[in-house]
Amino acid sequence: MEFDTIAAISTPIGTGGIGIIRISGQSAFEIAGKIIKSKKFGSVYDIPVRYAALVEVYDNEEFIDQAILIKFRSPHSYTGEDVVEIQAHGGMVVLRRILEAIIRNGARHAMPGEFTKRAFLNGRLDLAQAEAIVDIINSRTELLQKAAAKQLKGAVSKKIDEISEILLNLISSIEASIDFSEHEVSELSDEEIENSIDAALEKIDGLLKTYETGKAIKSGIYTVIVGRPNVGKSSLLNRLLKEERSIVTDIPGTTRDVIEEVLDIEGIPVVLVDTAGVRQTEDVVEKIGVQRTLKSVERADLVIFMVEACKITPEDMEIFENIKHKKFIVLVNKTDRGINITQDDIKRAFGKEGIFISLAKDENLEAVEKAIKETILGQGIEAFDEVIITSLRHKELLSKAREYLESAKQNIKSFPLDILSIDIKNALDSIYQITGRKVTEDMVERIFSMFCIGK
Ligand code: GDP
Ligand code: ZN
Protein backbone atom coordinates (compact mmCIF):
# COMPACT_ATOMS: atom_id res chain seq x y z
CA MET A 1 0.00 0.00 0.00
CA GLU A 2 1.16 3.54 -0.71
CA PHE A 3 0.30 6.48 1.47
CA ASP A 4 1.31 10.11 1.73
CA THR A 5 4.36 11.01 3.80
CA ILE A 6 3.83 11.73 7.48
CA ALA A 7 6.09 13.14 10.17
CA ALA A 8 6.02 13.67 13.93
CA ILE A 9 8.19 14.21 16.98
CA SER A 10 8.28 10.70 18.45
CA THR A 11 9.89 11.45 21.79
CA PRO A 12 8.06 13.07 24.74
CA ILE A 13 7.39 16.80 24.77
CA GLY A 14 9.94 18.47 27.01
CA THR A 15 13.70 18.69 27.07
CA GLY A 16 16.11 15.78 26.83
CA GLY A 17 19.53 14.85 25.50
CA ILE A 18 18.03 13.91 22.18
CA GLY A 19 14.66 14.12 20.50
CA ILE A 20 13.62 12.01 17.54
CA ILE A 21 11.60 13.06 14.54
CA ARG A 22 10.22 10.32 12.40
CA ILE A 23 9.25 10.65 8.74
CA SER A 24 7.48 7.82 6.94
CA GLY A 25 6.22 7.47 3.40
CA GLN A 26 7.35 7.37 -0.18
CA SER A 27 8.79 10.93 -0.10
CA ALA A 28 10.61 10.48 3.23
CA PHE A 29 14.12 10.46 1.71
CA GLU A 30 13.36 13.30 -0.68
CA ILE A 31 11.92 15.53 2.05
CA ALA A 32 14.77 14.79 4.48
CA GLY A 33 17.16 15.65 1.65
CA LYS A 34 15.74 19.16 1.49
CA ILE A 35 16.56 20.01 5.09
CA ILE A 36 19.82 18.21 5.79
CA LYS A 37 23.39 18.32 4.58
CA SER A 38 25.95 15.59 5.08
CA LYS A 39 29.65 16.41 4.78
CA LYS A 40 30.56 12.78 4.38
CA PHE A 41 27.84 11.63 1.99
CA GLY A 42 26.59 14.79 0.34
CA SER A 43 23.05 13.78 -0.53
CA VAL A 44 20.62 11.84 1.69
CA TYR A 45 20.28 9.36 -1.15
CA ASP A 46 23.94 8.43 -0.75
CA ILE A 47 23.69 7.67 2.98
CA PRO A 48 23.56 3.88 3.35
CA VAL A 49 20.44 2.42 4.98
CA ARG A 50 20.55 1.76 8.73
CA TYR A 51 23.70 3.80 9.02
CA ALA A 52 23.91 6.49 11.71
CA ALA A 53 25.08 9.48 9.70
CA LEU A 54 26.12 12.77 11.23
CA VAL A 55 24.21 15.53 9.44
CA GLU A 56 23.46 19.23 9.67
CA VAL A 57 19.85 20.35 9.74
CA TYR A 58 18.85 23.54 7.92
CA ASP A 59 15.70 25.57 7.94
CA ASN A 60 15.67 27.81 4.86
CA GLU A 61 19.47 27.87 4.66
CA GLU A 62 19.72 28.66 8.38
CA PHE A 63 21.71 26.04 10.25
CA ILE A 64 19.58 24.93 13.21
CA ASP A 65 21.09 21.77 14.66
CA GLN A 66 23.47 18.89 14.30
CA ALA A 67 21.80 15.50 14.23
CA ILE A 68 22.10 11.80 13.51
CA LEU A 69 20.07 10.58 10.58
CA ILE A 70 19.08 6.97 10.00
CA LYS A 71 17.37 5.73 6.85
CA PHE A 72 15.23 2.62 6.66
CA ARG A 73 14.17 1.37 3.27
CA SER A 74 10.74 -0.15 2.66
CA PRO A 75 9.74 -2.79 3.65
CA HIS A 76 12.42 -3.05 6.32
CA SER A 77 11.18 -0.37 8.67
CA TYR A 78 8.73 0.03 11.53
CA THR A 79 5.95 1.16 9.19
CA GLY A 80 7.03 -0.97 6.26
CA GLU A 81 7.57 2.26 4.27
CA ASP A 82 10.66 4.37 3.62
CA VAL A 83 11.45 5.91 7.00
CA VAL A 84 13.89 8.58 8.13
CA GLU A 85 14.66 9.14 11.78
CA ILE A 86 16.36 12.38 12.69
CA GLN A 87 17.90 12.34 16.15
CA ALA A 88 18.38 15.97 17.01
CA HIS A 89 19.03 17.63 20.35
CA GLY A 90 16.03 17.30 22.62
CA GLY A 91 14.81 20.88 22.88
CA MET A 92 11.19 21.76 22.24
CA VAL A 93 11.91 24.70 19.93
CA VAL A 94 14.54 22.98 17.83
CA LEU A 95 12.41 19.86 17.36
CA ARG A 96 9.36 21.93 16.41
CA ARG A 97 11.43 23.91 13.89
CA ILE A 98 12.76 20.75 12.28
CA LEU A 99 9.29 19.25 12.12
CA GLU A 100 7.81 22.40 10.62
CA ALA A 101 10.59 22.47 8.01
CA ILE A 102 9.74 18.87 7.11
CA ILE A 103 6.05 19.75 6.83
CA ARG A 104 6.81 22.76 4.65
CA ASN A 105 8.74 20.45 2.35
CA GLY A 106 5.79 18.20 1.74
CA ALA A 107 5.10 15.89 4.69
CA ARG A 108 1.91 15.94 6.72
CA HIS A 109 1.61 15.92 10.53
CA ALA A 110 1.00 12.34 11.63
CA MET A 111 -2.22 11.51 13.46
CA PRO A 112 -2.06 9.72 16.82
CA GLY A 113 -0.99 6.12 16.27
CA GLU A 114 -0.54 6.62 12.54
CA PHE A 115 2.97 5.10 12.33
CA THR A 116 1.78 1.91 14.02
CA LYS A 117 -1.40 1.93 11.96
CA ARG A 118 0.73 1.90 8.83
CA ALA A 119 2.79 -0.91 10.27
CA PHE A 120 -0.46 -2.85 10.65
CA LEU A 121 -1.85 -1.91 7.23
CA ASN A 122 1.48 -2.85 5.64
CA GLY A 123 1.44 -6.21 7.39
CA ARG A 124 4.36 -5.56 9.75
CA LEU A 125 2.23 -6.28 12.82
CA ASP A 126 -1.14 -7.84 13.43
CA LEU A 127 -3.79 -6.00 15.38
CA ALA A 128 -3.13 -7.76 18.68
CA GLN A 129 0.55 -6.86 18.39
CA ALA A 130 -0.26 -3.24 17.60
CA GLU A 131 -2.48 -3.11 20.67
CA ALA A 132 0.37 -4.53 22.72
CA ILE A 133 2.44 -1.48 21.79
CA VAL A 134 -0.20 0.80 23.36
CA ASP A 135 0.04 -1.28 26.52
CA ILE A 136 3.82 -1.29 26.58
CA ILE A 137 3.83 2.48 26.26
CA ASN A 138 1.15 2.96 28.90
CA SER A 139 1.96 0.26 31.41
CA ARG A 140 2.40 1.53 34.93
CA THR A 141 3.35 -1.85 36.36
CA GLU A 142 5.83 -4.50 35.40
CA LEU A 143 3.11 -7.16 35.10
CA LEU A 144 1.26 -5.26 32.38
CA GLN A 145 4.49 -4.55 30.58
CA LYS A 146 5.31 -8.27 30.73
CA ALA A 147 1.90 -9.33 29.44
CA ALA A 148 2.12 -6.74 26.67
CA ALA A 149 5.62 -7.82 25.69
CA LYS A 150 4.36 -11.37 25.23
CA GLN A 151 1.51 -10.11 23.14
CA LEU A 152 3.90 -8.05 21.02
CA LYS A 153 6.06 -11.08 20.40
CA GLY A 154 2.99 -12.79 19.04
CA ALA A 155 2.04 -15.12 21.90
CA VAL A 156 -1.60 -14.05 21.86
CA SER A 157 -1.72 -14.12 18.07
CA LYS A 158 -0.31 -17.65 18.10
CA LYS A 159 -3.09 -18.89 20.40
CA ILE A 160 -5.63 -17.14 18.22
CA ASP A 161 -4.14 -18.76 15.11
CA GLU A 162 -4.46 -22.18 16.75
CA ILE A 163 -8.18 -21.58 17.24
CA SER A 164 -8.74 -20.29 13.72
CA GLU A 165 -6.80 -23.28 12.37
CA ILE A 166 -9.25 -25.70 14.03
CA LEU A 167 -12.25 -23.76 12.78
CA LEU A 168 -10.87 -23.41 9.27
CA ASN A 169 -10.21 -27.14 9.07
CA LEU A 170 -13.70 -27.86 10.31
CA ILE A 171 -15.26 -25.51 7.76
CA SER A 172 -13.32 -27.06 4.91
CA SER A 173 -14.23 -30.59 6.09
CA ILE A 174 -17.87 -29.57 6.18
CA GLU A 175 -17.66 -28.09 2.74
CA ALA A 176 -15.87 -31.14 1.37
CA SER A 177 -18.47 -33.33 3.01
CA ILE A 178 -21.32 -31.37 1.42
CA ASP A 179 -19.58 -31.83 -1.93
CA PHE A 180 -18.83 -35.50 -1.41
CA SER A 181 -22.29 -36.46 -0.24
CA GLU A 182 -23.58 -35.53 -3.67
CA HIS A 183 -21.27 -38.20 -4.99
CA GLU A 184 -22.13 -40.49 -2.09
CA VAL A 185 -18.63 -40.56 -0.70
CA SER A 186 -17.71 -40.41 3.02
CA GLU A 187 -19.65 -38.15 5.36
CA LEU A 188 -18.40 -36.12 8.27
CA SER A 189 -19.81 -37.67 11.43
CA ASP A 190 -21.58 -35.63 14.11
CA GLU A 191 -18.90 -36.77 16.56
CA GLU A 192 -16.12 -35.42 14.41
CA ILE A 193 -17.82 -32.06 14.20
CA GLU A 194 -18.50 -32.00 17.92
CA ASN A 195 -14.89 -32.91 18.71
CA SER A 196 -13.56 -30.08 16.60
CA ILE A 197 -15.94 -27.59 18.15
CA ASP A 198 -14.96 -28.81 21.61
CA ALA A 199 -11.28 -28.47 20.82
CA ALA A 200 -11.83 -24.86 19.76
CA LEU A 201 -14.03 -24.16 22.79
CA GLU A 202 -11.39 -25.53 25.11
CA LYS A 203 -8.78 -23.16 23.73
CA ILE A 204 -11.19 -20.22 23.82
CA ASP A 205 -12.10 -20.96 27.43
CA GLY A 206 -8.44 -21.27 28.35
CA LEU A 207 -7.87 -17.73 27.10
CA LEU A 208 -11.09 -16.32 28.56
CA LYS A 209 -10.15 -17.69 31.95
CA THR A 210 -7.09 -15.44 32.01
CA TYR A 211 -9.09 -12.27 31.46
CA GLU A 212 -9.96 -11.64 35.09
CA THR A 213 -6.27 -11.51 35.90
CA GLY A 214 -5.62 -9.56 32.72
CA LYS A 215 -8.22 -6.98 33.60
CA ALA A 216 -6.79 -6.62 37.10
CA ILE A 217 -3.31 -6.16 35.65
CA LYS A 218 -4.44 -3.62 33.09
CA SER A 219 -7.21 -1.61 34.69
CA GLY A 220 -6.33 -2.19 38.30
CA ILE A 221 -8.58 -3.37 41.06
CA TYR A 222 -11.02 -0.61 41.94
CA THR A 223 -11.14 -0.90 45.70
CA VAL A 224 -13.48 1.25 47.75
CA ILE A 225 -13.03 1.74 51.50
CA VAL A 226 -16.33 2.21 53.33
CA GLY A 227 -17.40 2.43 56.94
CA ARG A 228 -19.05 4.83 59.31
CA PRO A 229 -17.29 8.12 60.11
CA ASN A 230 -14.15 7.78 62.20
CA VAL A 231 -13.61 4.01 61.83
CA GLY A 232 -10.25 4.76 60.22
CA LYS A 233 -10.82 4.81 56.43
CA SER A 234 -8.47 7.70 55.73
CA SER A 235 -5.92 6.27 58.14
CA LEU A 236 -6.02 2.96 56.26
CA LEU A 237 -5.47 4.64 52.92
CA ASN A 238 -2.57 6.58 54.37
CA ARG A 239 -0.97 3.57 55.97
CA LEU A 240 -1.28 1.56 52.79
CA LEU A 241 0.24 4.34 50.80
CA LYS A 242 2.76 4.97 53.56
CA GLU A 243 2.32 8.65 53.14
CA GLU A 244 -0.08 11.20 54.54
CA ARG A 245 -2.43 12.15 51.77
CA SER A 246 -5.99 12.58 52.92
CA ILE A 247 -6.72 14.54 56.05
CA VAL A 248 -7.04 12.40 59.15
CA THR A 249 -8.92 14.10 61.98
CA ASP A 250 -11.09 13.33 65.00
CA ILE A 251 -14.07 15.21 63.62
CA PRO A 252 -16.56 12.78 62.05
CA GLY A 253 -17.13 13.42 58.38
CA THR A 254 -13.87 15.17 57.42
CA THR A 255 -13.24 13.09 54.33
CA ARG A 256 -15.93 14.76 52.30
CA ASP A 257 -14.94 13.82 48.84
CA VAL A 258 -13.73 10.72 47.14
CA ILE A 259 -9.95 10.36 47.06
CA GLU A 260 -8.25 7.90 44.72
CA GLU A 261 -4.72 6.58 44.99
CA VAL A 262 -2.98 3.77 43.17
CA LEU A 263 -1.19 1.13 45.15
CA ASP A 264 1.06 -1.48 43.58
CA ILE A 265 0.40 -4.82 45.22
CA GLU A 266 2.77 -7.35 43.69
CA GLY A 267 2.50 -5.77 40.29
CA ILE A 268 -1.26 -5.30 40.35
CA PRO A 269 -2.42 -1.69 40.38
CA VAL A 270 -4.92 -1.35 43.20
CA VAL A 271 -6.92 1.83 42.88
CA LEU A 272 -7.84 2.70 46.46
CA VAL A 273 -10.79 4.95 47.00
CA ASP A 274 -11.32 6.68 50.34
CA THR A 275 -14.92 7.73 50.73
CA ALA A 276 -16.91 9.93 53.00
CA GLY A 277 -18.52 7.98 55.81
CA VAL A 278 -21.78 6.48 54.64
CA ARG A 279 -24.36 7.97 57.01
CA GLN A 280 -27.54 9.97 57.04
CA THR A 281 -26.61 13.61 56.85
CA GLU A 282 -28.16 17.02 56.39
CA ASP A 283 -24.90 18.69 55.37
CA VAL A 284 -25.05 19.38 51.62
CA VAL A 285 -21.34 18.87 50.89
CA GLU A 286 -21.32 15.67 52.86
CA LYS A 287 -24.51 14.46 51.21
CA ILE A 288 -22.82 14.68 47.82
CA GLY A 289 -19.92 12.73 49.31
CA VAL A 290 -22.27 10.01 50.51
CA GLN A 291 -23.89 9.71 47.10
CA ARG A 292 -20.48 9.43 45.50
CA THR A 293 -19.61 6.72 47.96
CA LEU A 294 -22.60 4.67 46.95
CA LYS A 295 -21.71 5.22 43.29
CA SER A 296 -18.12 4.17 43.93
CA VAL A 297 -19.40 1.04 45.62
CA GLU A 298 -21.33 0.14 42.48
CA ARG A 299 -18.17 0.49 40.38
CA ALA A 300 -16.02 -1.38 42.86
CA ASP A 301 -14.25 -4.65 42.11
CA LEU A 302 -13.67 -4.91 45.83
CA VAL A 303 -15.05 -3.19 48.93
CA ILE A 304 -13.04 -2.82 52.11
CA PHE A 305 -15.64 -2.62 54.84
CA MET A 306 -14.36 -1.22 58.14
CA VAL A 307 -15.81 -1.51 61.62
CA GLU A 308 -14.37 -0.91 65.09
CA ALA A 309 -13.30 -3.61 67.52
CA CYS A 310 -15.33 -2.15 70.38
CA LYS A 311 -18.73 -2.99 68.88
CA ILE A 312 -20.82 -3.53 65.79
CA THR A 313 -23.35 -0.70 65.58
CA PRO A 314 -26.69 -0.44 63.76
CA GLU A 315 -24.99 2.07 61.48
CA ASP A 316 -22.46 -0.62 60.52
CA MET A 317 -25.31 -2.95 59.65
CA GLU A 318 -26.94 -0.29 57.51
CA ILE A 319 -23.73 0.28 55.56
CA PHE A 320 -23.29 -3.45 55.19
CA GLU A 321 -26.68 -3.63 53.44
CA ASN A 322 -25.24 -1.36 50.71
CA ILE A 323 -22.13 -3.40 50.05
CA LYS A 324 -23.00 -7.04 50.74
CA HIS A 325 -23.72 -7.78 47.06
CA LYS A 326 -20.10 -6.91 46.18
CA LYS A 327 -16.84 -8.75 46.78
CA PHE A 328 -15.76 -7.44 50.17
CA ILE A 329 -13.40 -7.90 53.07
CA VAL A 330 -14.12 -6.89 56.66
CA LEU A 331 -11.51 -4.98 58.65
CA VAL A 332 -11.97 -4.71 62.39
CA ASN A 333 -9.94 -1.66 63.37
CA LYS A 334 -8.69 -0.08 66.60
CA THR A 335 -7.87 -3.32 68.38
CA ASP A 336 -5.48 -1.26 70.52
CA ARG A 337 -8.51 0.26 72.23
CA GLY A 338 -9.80 -3.11 73.37
CA ILE A 339 -11.61 -5.89 71.56
CA ASN A 340 -15.22 -6.47 72.54
CA ILE A 341 -16.33 -8.47 69.52
CA THR A 342 -15.35 -11.98 68.41
CA GLN A 343 -14.83 -13.63 65.03
CA ASP A 344 -18.21 -15.32 65.64
CA ASP A 345 -19.94 -11.97 66.02
CA ILE A 346 -18.37 -10.82 62.77
CA LYS A 347 -19.39 -13.98 60.98
CA ARG A 348 -22.93 -13.78 62.27
CA ALA A 349 -23.26 -10.15 61.20
CA PHE A 350 -21.41 -10.16 57.87
CA GLY A 351 -21.20 -13.78 56.81
CA LYS A 352 -17.41 -14.03 56.93
CA GLU A 353 -14.44 -13.57 59.21
CA GLY A 354 -12.84 -10.19 59.69
CA ILE A 355 -9.22 -9.12 59.78
CA PHE A 356 -8.38 -7.54 63.15
CA ILE A 357 -6.04 -4.60 62.78
CA SER A 358 -4.77 -1.55 64.57
CA LEU A 359 -3.84 1.31 62.32
CA ALA A 360 -2.56 3.26 65.30
CA LYS A 361 -0.12 0.46 66.16
CA ASP A 362 0.49 -0.63 62.54
CA GLU A 363 -0.69 -4.12 63.45
CA ASN A 364 -1.60 -6.84 60.94
CA LEU A 365 -1.50 -4.64 57.85
CA GLU A 366 0.23 -7.33 55.74
CA ALA A 367 -2.94 -9.37 56.16
CA VAL A 368 -4.90 -6.56 54.52
CA GLU A 369 -2.73 -6.50 51.40
CA LYS A 370 -2.83 -10.27 51.20
CA ALA A 371 -6.62 -10.30 51.51
CA ILE A 372 -6.99 -7.68 48.77
CA LYS A 373 -4.91 -9.76 46.42
CA GLU A 374 -6.47 -13.09 47.24
CA THR A 375 -10.05 -11.89 47.12
CA ILE A 376 -9.53 -10.71 43.55
CA LEU A 377 -7.11 -13.22 42.14
CA GLY A 378 -7.73 -16.30 44.21
CA GLN A 379 -4.43 -17.91 45.06
CA GLY A 380 -2.47 -15.40 43.06
CA ILE A 381 -1.05 -15.18 39.62
CA GLU A 382 1.55 -17.89 39.61
CA ALA A 383 0.27 -18.90 36.17
CA PHE A 384 2.09 -15.96 34.69
CA ASP A 385 4.03 -18.04 32.23
CA GLU A 386 0.79 -18.38 30.36
CA VAL A 387 -0.52 -15.95 27.80
CA ILE A 388 -2.88 -13.52 29.47
CA ILE A 389 -5.70 -11.67 27.76
CA THR A 390 -5.70 -8.08 28.99
CA SER A 391 -7.86 -6.52 26.31
CA LEU A 392 -11.62 -6.15 26.72
CA ARG A 393 -11.92 -6.21 22.93
CA HIS A 394 -10.25 -9.61 22.77
CA LYS A 395 -12.38 -10.93 25.59
CA GLU A 396 -15.58 -9.82 23.90
CA LEU A 397 -14.61 -11.36 20.57
CA LEU A 398 -13.67 -14.63 22.24
CA SER A 399 -17.00 -14.66 24.06
CA LYS A 400 -18.82 -14.01 20.82
CA ALA A 401 -17.00 -16.86 19.08
CA ARG A 402 -17.89 -19.04 22.04
CA GLU A 403 -21.61 -18.27 21.64
CA TYR A 404 -21.57 -19.14 17.94
CA LEU A 405 -19.80 -22.41 18.64
CA GLU A 406 -22.20 -23.34 21.45
CA SER A 407 -25.08 -22.64 19.10
CA ALA A 408 -23.50 -24.79 16.37
CA LYS A 409 -22.91 -27.57 18.87
CA GLN A 410 -26.55 -27.60 19.93
CA ASN A 411 -27.69 -27.81 16.34
CA ILE A 412 -25.42 -30.58 15.11
CA LYS A 413 -28.18 -33.18 15.20
CA SER A 414 -31.02 -31.00 14.01
CA PHE A 415 -29.57 -28.77 11.29
CA PRO A 416 -28.10 -29.58 7.88
CA LEU A 417 -24.37 -29.04 7.44
CA ASP A 418 -24.58 -25.90 5.35
CA ILE A 419 -26.66 -24.16 8.04
CA LEU A 420 -24.32 -25.40 10.76
CA SER A 421 -21.35 -23.97 8.98
CA ILE A 422 -22.81 -20.45 9.19
CA ASP A 423 -22.32 -20.38 12.96
CA ILE A 424 -18.83 -21.77 12.63
CA LYS A 425 -17.92 -19.18 10.02
CA ASN A 426 -19.25 -16.46 12.29
CA ALA A 427 -17.13 -17.82 15.12
CA LEU A 428 -14.07 -17.80 12.86
CA ASP A 429 -14.86 -14.25 11.83
CA SER A 430 -14.88 -13.11 15.47
CA ILE A 431 -11.57 -14.86 16.07
CA TYR A 432 -10.05 -13.26 12.98
CA GLN A 433 -11.01 -9.83 14.26
CA ILE A 434 -8.64 -10.25 17.21
CA THR A 435 -5.58 -10.29 14.99
CA GLY A 436 -7.24 -8.14 12.36
CA ARG A 437 -7.20 -10.52 9.46
CA LYS A 438 -10.62 -9.25 8.71
CA VAL A 439 -11.45 -5.99 10.32
CA THR A 440 -13.76 -3.14 9.66
CA GLU A 441 -12.32 0.28 8.83
CA ASP A 442 -14.10 1.65 11.86
CA MET A 443 -12.37 -0.74 14.25
CA VAL A 444 -8.95 0.15 12.87
CA GLU A 445 -9.72 3.83 13.48
CA ARG A 446 -10.82 3.16 17.04
CA ILE A 447 -7.78 1.11 17.98
CA PHE A 448 -5.20 3.49 16.56
CA SER A 449 -6.83 6.58 18.00
CA MET A 450 -5.69 5.33 21.41
CA PHE A 451 -2.07 5.95 20.49
CA CYS A 452 -0.36 9.24 20.96
CA ILE A 453 1.28 11.18 18.15
CA GLY A 454 4.63 9.91 16.97
CA LYS A 455 3.96 6.22 17.71
P1 GDP B 1 -12.44 7.97 58.77
O1 GDP B 1 -13.43 9.00 59.15
O2 GDP B 1 -13.09 6.62 58.69
O3 GDP B 1 -11.66 8.30 57.56
O4 GDP B 1 -11.42 7.84 60.02
P2 GDP B 1 -9.96 8.48 60.15
O5 GDP B 1 -8.99 7.68 59.42
O6 GDP B 1 -10.05 9.92 59.86
O7 GDP B 1 -9.69 8.22 61.69
C1 GDP B 1 -10.47 8.80 62.69
C2 GDP B 1 -9.68 8.85 63.99
O8 GDP B 1 -9.42 7.53 64.46
C3 GDP B 1 -8.32 9.51 63.85
O9 GDP B 1 -8.09 10.30 64.99
C4 GDP B 1 -7.36 8.34 63.79
O10 GDP B 1 -6.09 8.69 64.28
C5 GDP B 1 -8.04 7.36 64.71
N1 GDP B 1 -7.65 5.98 64.44
C6 GDP B 1 -7.60 5.37 63.24
N2 GDP B 1 -7.19 4.08 63.39
C7 GDP B 1 -6.98 3.88 64.70
C8 GDP B 1 -6.54 2.76 65.46
O11 GDP B 1 -6.24 1.67 64.98
N3 GDP B 1 -6.47 2.94 66.81
C9 GDP B 1 -6.77 4.12 67.41
N4 GDP B 1 -6.65 4.19 68.73
N5 GDP B 1 -7.16 5.19 66.70
C10 GDP B 1 -7.27 5.08 65.37
ZN1 ZN C 1 -11.79 9.83 56.39
Image: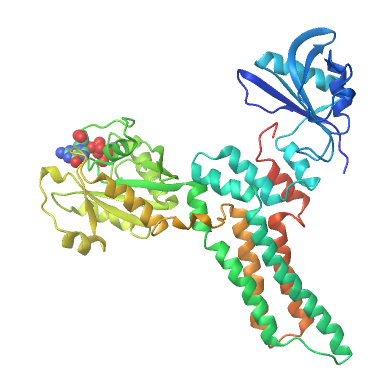
Going by the picture, which residue comes out furthest to the bottom?
Answer: 184
When the figure is inspected, residue 191 is found, relative to residue 392, above or below; the finding is below
Residue 294 in percent (x, y) is at 38, 48
Residue 288 in percent (x, y) is at 38, 40
- Quarter of the figure with residue 245: top left
Relative to 228, 290 lies left or right: right
When the figure is inspected, residue 77 is found, relative to residue 378, above or below; the finding is above
The image shows a total of numbered marks equal to 0
Q: Quadrant of the N terminus?
A: top right
Residue 77 in percent (x, y) is at 78, 37
The foreground one among 148 and 434 is 148
Instruction: Please report the residue visible at 88 percent of the width from the left and 33 percent of the height from the top.
Output: 26
Q: Quadrant of the C terminus?
A: top right
The foreground one among 380 and 342 is 380
Residue 444 in percent (x, y) is at 74, 48
Mark yes or no: residue 182 visible: yes
Ligand 1's image quarter is top left
When the figure is inspected, residue 266 is found, relative to residue 454, above or below; the finding is below
The foreground one among 298 and 133 is 133
Instruction: Please report the residue visible at 57 percent of the width from the left and 55 percent of the height from the top.
Output: 389
Going by the picture, which residue comes out furthest to the top?
Answer: 62
The foreground one among 366 and 85 is 85
Mark yes or no: residue 406 visible: no
Relative to 308, 99 lies left or right: right
Which colour assignment does the render follow?
A: rainbow
